[in-house]
Amino acid sequence: MITSILVLSTLLFLFSAIRRIIAKSQQHDLPLPPGPKGLPILGNVLDIKQRKDRPRWEVYRNWSTQYGSDISANELLEKRSGNYSDRPPMYMVNDLMKWDWDFVHMRYSDQWRRVANYFQIRNASQFHEVQKAASLSLLQKLAASPDDYYNHVRGHAGSIILKLVYGYTLQEDDPYIELAAKAMEGLIAAVNHGSFLVDFLPILKHVPSWLPGASFKRKAKAWVADSIAIKERPWEWFAMAMGKGTASPSFASRTLEKNIDNPEMIDVIKNSSAIAYLAGSDTTVSLILSFILAMVLHPEIQARAQAEIDAVVGSTRLPDFDDREKLPYIEAILAESLRWHPVAPLAIPHRSIKDDVYGNLYIPAGTTIVANAWAIMHDDAIYPDPSAFNPERFVKQEGKELPPHPEQFAFGFGRRVCPGKHVASSSAWLAMVYLLSTFSMARALDGNGKEIDPEINYNDGLVRPLWYSSGNVWDIGPVRGEPRWRRYHSWSSQYDSDAVYIEVCGDPMIILNSREAVVKLLAKCSSYYSDRSRMMYMANDLSGTHWDTSRMRYPDWWSVVK
């Protein structure tokens, strides 16, 4: 046992030392972005670990302030998206958990491009009937058992995506909802950058699972089954329905019919379907639950929204998509719900493909780029009093310039933006207007009839669903986990810089805490920054999710799924 630990420690030391020597030999005349000083060999690996006292996105923002950097996320991730569309390798997710089929995490490659081609949504209105049926079902379930509203909201999102992707009609206590929740639980734990040391020291992939400190190997082994199940089980139902001739029109059926003479594409279509199913399940849930929390906390905003609906729609019918342009305050509430508590506070990491220069700063090839969406949407220069839920900031007024719409930042950046964002947004909008038309959302009461003040906490995941319990009325209670994007945000303040540079075991990493930096690198230079980081060994190698295109390298198979 002691010998194994000594050998492992020696290997880690040599591995990190070699990487740092290589990095030193490739130094540029221009300086790197500023950032906190790291430890010998390990670099800043401890700085980006999850903390209990403060979420990472706040720490990262404070670093930017402390170091005075003005690197713009908009400039890098949007304007230079050609260079910043890659992903880090993500060893935990892609190698160990076997999510490397997920196009969201694929490296920027021909494979990613092929996959991404399947997700071009040109007419979101084709989904409206499915969304309306699911939203009506949500109202019926809430009326019958309002205390179980978390599961009802989760079922609402799942029913929409299962119908659109597979043509599947959700059943009562449907196993596919739990299947998605279980898969997301492991994925969220692993994909969060900095959660597992193996993402920075890939040599750890090869340590035996019984070794002290190798619990990540045991976790990955347990999570592999979820990666396989989320891909195979819904597809088995769909294939059976196709064989019987009973399959409803869906993404899977239409895509399969177009490739009927190309059997090699079946796996690509299967993977693409699973990606859409998984991605569409949680983003809408997180957004709707944040909206519910806001309505509970701000009854005056809820009353104004209900008055707008009554004035436009009346009391004889429910709102419809045709009413959307006539309901600007509801639109403002949707925008503020996205901004107030982003569904993904820290965007999935990007990775630079080539050396780049931003102003007088040098960004080496292979640098992991983390866009701090939370910091961007809590920039008080753009969104005054950012902690307050204030839809008024998005209401059009004569002579008033509206701030950037949060949808620009909430669903990713550049070429790696979520292709289903309009479906998620429209599903959430319809659920919101249905809820406002039929229910009032209020604080729970204690045994003495006094209102209970809800705690506002979110978990530190890729997508942040709100977890809480309710009594007779909706009650927002404590949630699981401690978020980290606040820590990243605090780094901007601490170092007076919107872009903070750190090293993790010799791997360079830049955190972007401003909209301008994200757009400039990940959008405008996306061909340089569309790859994925290699720091996903846990998810891809150990957990069996190497098929997940969200983590695929760029271009490779990613382009097939798109």
Image (cartoon, grey):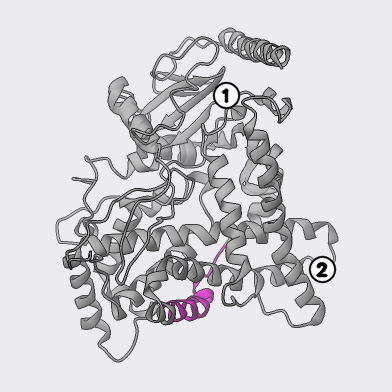
The amino acid type of the residue labelled 2 equals: Ile
Answer with left or right where residue 223 lies relative to residue 307. right
Query: Measuring 25% from the left and 78% from the top, which residue is drawn there?
Result: 309
Spot occupied by residue 542 in the image (x, y as percentages of width and height): 70, 38
Residue 319 part of the magenta segment: no
Label number found at residue 10: none
Residue 135 part of the magenta segment: yes
Query: Measuring 57% from the left and 32% from the top, which residue is drawn there?
Result: 196
Image: 366 above or below 515: above
**Mark 2 sits on what residue?**
260
Query: Measuring 27% from the left and 60% from the top, which residue is drawn there?
Result: 294
In this view of the protein, can residue 93 be seen by the observer? no
Q: Name the foreground residue: 370 vs 470.
A: 470
Q: Quadrant of residue 117?
A: bottom right
Label number found at residue 365: 1
Image: 39 above or below 166: above
The amino acid type of the residue labelled 1 equals: Ala
User: Could you tell me how far apart the alpha carbons at marks 2 and 1 are, in whole angstroms?
Assistant: 41 Å
- Compare marks 2 and 1 and give the one earlier in the sequence: 2
